Every structure is written in C-alpha cells, then in structure tokens.
Amino acid sequence: MRLATWNVNSVKARLPRLLDWLAGTAPDVVCLQETKCPDGAFPVAEVGELGYEVASHSDGRWNGVAILSRVGLTDVTVGFPGEPGFPQPEARAISATCAGVRIWSVYVPNGRAVDDPHYAYKLAWFAALRDALEPEVAAGRPVAVCGDFNVAPTDADVWDPALFATSTHVTPAERAALAALRDLGLSDVVPTPMKGPHPYTYWDYRAGMFHQNKGMRIDLVYASAPLATTVRAAYVDREARKGKGPSDHAPIVVDTDPPAVDTP
DNA sequence: ATGACATGGAAACCATGA
C-alpha cells in the first residue's frame, strides 16, 4: 500500500496540482488536510476519474479533512467521540477503513499562542484523540494516524529552535501530547528528506523560506505496530512544494505492506 | 522582525495560518 498525507491549503486552489500529483505518485490512500472546502463542493468527480473514492468532512471556509482511496473506503467516521470544539467541534478528523487499515486524517488545532485559549483547545483535542485511538490500537489493528499535527516532535524538526522558544508547536506540553499517542503503541514513521538533513514538511510562504530550507516537520504519520513493522520506505515529496502555486506543506509518501485481510 | 504570502468570503479588507 502506498499511503500519503498532504495539507493542501485549499483543495479547490490546489486541484490542478493535486490531480497531477495523484497521477504521478499513484498513492493508494491519501489523507488531506485544510481542504477549506464547503460541504458538497469537494471535487469528487475529478479525483473519481483517477479511480479514487472520497470521504470528506467539511467546515466551510476553514479546516476540512478528507480521505481518498482506490483500495476501498468503508466505515467512515467523521470526528470522534468527545472531540472538543472552539466552542463547537470543527472539521479536523475523519477516519475510514481502507484495505483493512484504519486510516485517520487529522488537522490538529494550531494553538496560535501559548497564552491563547486556542492553545488549551489544542491540548484538549490531543487528549481526546488519544482516548479515541486507544481501543483501536490496543485491539492490534493496523492503524495509521496521518496529518498536520502542528507540533514539531524535537528541536531538530525546527529550522531555528531559538526563534520558536516562546511559540507554540515546540512546547513540552505539546510534545508530551505526541508522546502520549506514541505510548499507545504508535510509531513515528520518519520520512526521508530527499534533500538536506531534516525531513521538514512545512515552509512558510514568506521570505524565501522554502528556498533556504527553513522549515518544520509538523506533518506526521503515526502507525500501529502491525503496520509500522511493514514499512518499506517513506519520503517527503518536496518536489510538490516547488514551482508556482504550491501548498505551504509537502506531502509525505509511505510504502508499506499491511497484513492481508480476509475479504467477506 | 509587531513584516514577509496565501486563502476564502466578504467587500475592495479581514481572519487565519505556524
């Protein structure tokens, strides 16, 4: 199975690039974030022509997550039990079963600033996600939690840790939230950077940050043991961040061989 | 660097992003 995750920063604005990328990369399952796509406006027909089914969860103007699959897409769940809101739950999580793997596409709240209510929301959201994942992982299922986690796991995942010393994305509490997910039995599938030493997945649009490779690794793939043990390769597709009109995030592509499932 | 871009919806600016 070729599994990918990509914060596209508007599926509508990115559609030509998304379609080219799907055709060239040929992933079996794709988790998208920040689709920013109103309900009913997802380009289902366009990706359908490439053989993908779609499950999407929309918010209107902000957020938005989706799963594309060409290997089956069943048992779709939007959000999760106990999901916190701001104040109402937002379109930040969707899960489905694809070829026997439980796939999650998540867009973790940004947090904005450490003293902002949005930061407490972020931590609460992480805690509720952990509780929702616990039974699936404990049951020994192949699970992949993919998306924009809005946390850099280590200082090596930030181009200049000193600049972020008082910011979100690097605080001990946010990193502890990631650790709590790993403690369930999820492994961080660290991708190959393809260029430079750091597998960054996000570069600010401004000030030539991508050109200077001043980025962050905040998009992650967390895999349960039955899946993680079969990972053959993973990479950051930084080519997709180049050129005119890119997202500010690059996709992560993971090649894995999940356990075979009995087909009914 | 309290900036820089980019997006969508509303309105010819603003909230949001990280």
Image (tube, coloured by chain):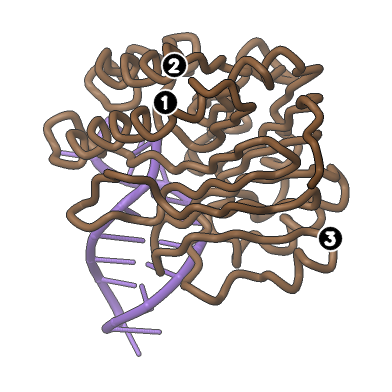
Chain colours: A brown, B purple
Mark linked to residue A182: none
Q: Where does label 1 land, which residue?
A: A134
Residue A95 vertical placement versus A196 (above, below): below
Q: Relative to A181, is A97 above or below?
A: below
On the rendered image, what quadrant is the N terminus of chain A found in? Answer: top right
The quadrant in which residue B11 appears is bottom left
| Left or right relative to A256: residue A171 | left
- Which marked residue is nearer to the observer: mark 3 or mark 2? 2
Query: What numbered label is drawn on residue A184?
Result: 2
Residue A24 location in percent, x, y?
A: 87, 47
The residue marked by circle 3 belongs to what chain? A
Q: How many marks?
A: 3
Is the residue marked by circle 1 packed among few (<14), some (14-19), or many (20+) residues within 10 Å?
A: some
Residue at 75% over, 64% down: A47
Which residue occupies 80% across, 37% down?
A262
Q: Dot 2 surroundings within 10 Å: few (below 14), some, or many (20 or more)?
A: some
Q: Position of residue A190 (x, y in %)?
A: 63, 16
Q: Nearer the viewer, residue A221 or A144?
A: A144
Measured along the vertical axis of the image, is residue A214 above or below residue A71?
A: above
Which of discs 3 and 1 lies nearer the camera? The answer is: 1
Label 1 secondary element: helix
What distance separates the C-alpha of mark 1 from that of mark 2?
Answer: 6 Å
Give the SS element for disc 2: loop
Give the label on residue A51, or none: 3
Q: What's the chain of the residue with tag 1?
A: A
Amino acid residing under circle 2: Leu
Q: Are the residues tagged 1 and 2 within 8 Å (C-beta)? A: yes
Residue drawn at 65 percent across, 10 percent down: A197
Which of marks 2 and 1 precedes in the sequence? 1
Which of the two discs, 3 and 2, labels the residue nearer the N terminus? 3
- Amino acid on which disc 3 is placed: Gly
